[in-house]
């Protein structure tokens, strides 16, 4: 029997081929999958703490992909590879590379010209990245870690707290996060910035 997924509001269902990419065949429940993914993410967080990340390398397609692979590569074969299927969220998959380049270029411009405050730059980047939905899964967690890396390694600021939650499980915190994302979709970034700070 394969793994049965219990998708929460705002999560993207995987197609059958993507589910086949599960490396740990002993995983049979959503809880076990969440646990293995969280352990993998903690390894990636540790890597960011002990590695001196060069700011000029962070805002690149190579780094975006390699961070996703570090976060999910112990669990999924396709970690770090752009999705090649349509999803309920995100842009059409053939446009991922182009749209990612646009957001990377825009973010570099914002930094260079002090267009916004650092936390707004990080959140604008996070929101655009998660909207593209580069990968089959893990986009929310990946985009939050990217925002933290921008805050810490590019601006030398504290990382966001994100309500001290991984937001995989359905909860009030997740509902607030999804609501803040929808506000950002409508051009109001303030709730997402406030959510990230708490």
Image (cartoon, grey):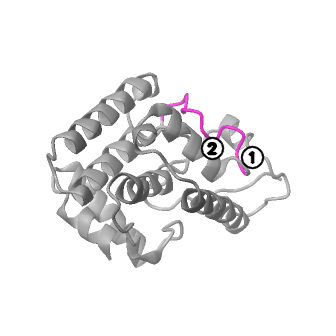
> Is residue 95 rendered to the left or right of residue 36?
left
Horizontal arrangement in the rendering, residue 177 relative to residue 3 (left or right) = left
Element class at badge 2:
helix
Badge 1 vs badge 2, beta-carbon distance below 8 Å: no
Q: Nearer the viewer, residue 121 or 136?
A: 121
Q: Image height check: is 183 above or below 64?
A: below
**Left or right placement of residue 51 versus residue 108 in this view:** right
In this figure, which residue is indicated by the disc labeled 1? 22
Quarter occupied by residue 131: top left
Q: What is the CA distance from the residue labelled 1 to the residue labelled 2?
A: 13 Å
Q: Residues within 10 Å of mark 2 (few under 14, many from 20)?
A: many
Q: Decide which of tag 1 and tag 2 comes sooner along the chain.
A: 1
Per the rendering, the mark at residue 139 is: none
Please tell me whether residue 83 belongs to the stretch shown in magenta: yes
Magenta residues span 75-86
Report the predominant secondary structure element of the magenta stretch.
loop
- Give the residue at x 30% y 57%: 181
Q: Quadrant of residue 3?
A: bottom right
Q: Position of residue 116 (x, y in %)?
A: 16, 51
Number of the front mark, 1 or 2: 2
Q: Quadrant of the C terminus?
A: bottom left
Q: Secondary structure at mark 1?
A: loop
Residue that mark 2 sits on = 69
Rendered residue at 48%/49% (across/down): 139
| Residue 69, x across and y down, in percent | 62, 44
């Amino acid at each position: 029997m394969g793994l049965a997924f219990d998708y929460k509001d705002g999560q993207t269902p995987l197609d059958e081929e993507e589910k086949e990419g599960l490396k740990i065949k002993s995983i049979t429940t959503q809880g076990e999958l969440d646990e293995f993914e969280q352990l993998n993410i903690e390894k990636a967080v540790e890597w960011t703490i002990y590695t001196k990340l060069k700011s000029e390398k962070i805002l690149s397609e190579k780094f975006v992909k390699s961070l996703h692979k570090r976060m999910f590569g112990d669990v999924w074969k396709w970690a770090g590879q752009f999705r090649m299927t349509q999803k309920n969220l995100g842009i059409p998959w053939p446009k991922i590379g182009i749209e990612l380049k646009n957001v990377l270029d825009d973010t570099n411009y914002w930094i260079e010209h002090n267009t916004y405050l650092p936390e707004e730059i990080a959140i604008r980047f996070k929101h655009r990245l998660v909207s593209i939905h580069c990968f089959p899964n893990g986009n929310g967690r990946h985009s939050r870690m990217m925002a933290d890396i921008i805050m810490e390694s590019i601006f030398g600021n504290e990382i966001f707290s994100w309500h001290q939650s991984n937001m995989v499980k359905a909860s009030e915190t997740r509902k607030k996060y999804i609501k803040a994302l929808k506000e950002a979709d409508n051009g109001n970034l303030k709730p997402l910035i406030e959510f990230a700070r708490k």
